[in-house]
Image (tube, coloured by chain):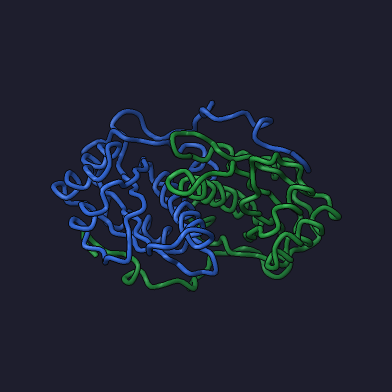
Chain colours: A green, B blue
Amino acid sequence: METWDALGSRRNVRSYSERPIAPEDLDRILEAARITPSSANEQRWDFIVCTDRRQLEDLSKVWDGAGHIATSAATIGLVAPKTDEGYARDSVHYDLGQATMSIMLAAADMGVGSAHAWVSDQDRARRLLGFPQDRFLAWLIALGHPADRPLTPIKHPKRRSFDDVVHRGRW
Amino acid sequence: METWDALGSRRNVRSYSERPIAPEDLDRILEAARITPSSANEQRWDFIVCTDRRQLEDLSKVWDGAGHIATSAATIGLVAPKTDEGYARDSVHYDLGQATMSIMLAAADMGVGSAHAWVSDQDRARRLLGFPQDRFLAWLIALGHPADRPLTPIKHPKRRSFDDVVHRGRW
């Protein structure tokens, strides 16, 4: 798919068909995450990929808004080192955002939908995924073929207008 | 360009040719930023795009590592609301990371290189860009055609190995 079509057709999908994601496609999505840029190339991230239905159902309980994880074809957990406030913490989240977009666009390129989830219950997340005490599960990215309509370029995305959000030269 | 080629050929470029970026190409890059997903679709961002050489030179002084801004064809400043610590702050940076990757991939799709810069001198940034007191300039993304070799898929990106960074099912 053309890059612009992937950018333009990516949308948050929280209702998934039962069609699995082929293992080689899932690995390609993970490869997109792996090669994402990060602050000073520190790569302060690990990606835990879950495809087991029972585990996905359990994982969907780490946050009130994570119900869609349960029915996803696969979910990628973004694990990062715990950091103090300030630049380290800001840049960890910034870098995880970059990895997220790589994941979502690589997925959209194959017609695979995606949706974020936050994590409020770190103890449950650690029990389910086994990551060390000095890390936390920052975000989850659910993946799956859309249950309703395929991904196609969105004509009128619900966003602030171009002229509102873009400033030329000065605010 | 195919999405995968854009993902695989994007690299940090800090040395730019004198070739400008066509206004319609720059607007397309900004459109990619505009349609990026964000937490609860809050779109807590504004994009200030700079192409004036004098302004770019001044802007390159907002951080010790921002020298490449001076010679970029264009630079996009990511402005966000000041937030308290915690989820609001984490998610602002996460969302800006998502917008950054949209910008960089839309640019790579046109053969345009890019590189991040942080901002340490907020007073100077505010003087140059005129954003309100309740906002800050979080990051800068410099853009330009590479001075050396064109963007082509990178065979061996300098990253942790796939098996190191990807965990299947559990850490």
Q: Is residue B27 above or below residue B121?
A: below
- Which residue is pictured at 44% across the width and 55% down the height? B96
> A170 or A122, which lies in front?
A122
Q: Residue at x 39, y 61 (%)?
A: B31
Percent of width and height locating residue A50: 76, 48
Which of the 4 image quarters holds residue A69? bottom right
Position in image of residue B37 (x %, y %)? 52, 62
Q: Position of B127 compared to A55: left or right?
A: left
The answer to which quarter of the image holds residue A57 is bottom right
Tell me which corner region of the image, top left, top right, bottom left or bottom right, holds residue A130. top right
Image check: A25 left or right of B132? Answer: right
Q: Residue at x 64, y 51 (%)?
A: A110
Would residue A55 be found to the left or right of residue A169 on screen?
right
Question: Which x, y percent locates residue B123?
Answer: 22, 54
Residue extending farthest to the left is: B54
The C terminus of chain B lies in which quarter of the figure? top right
Q: Count the marks.
A: 0
Query: Residue at the spot x=32%, y=66% of the render?
Result: B134
Single out the residue that lies furthest toward the right. A54
Viewer-proximal residue, A144 or B86? B86
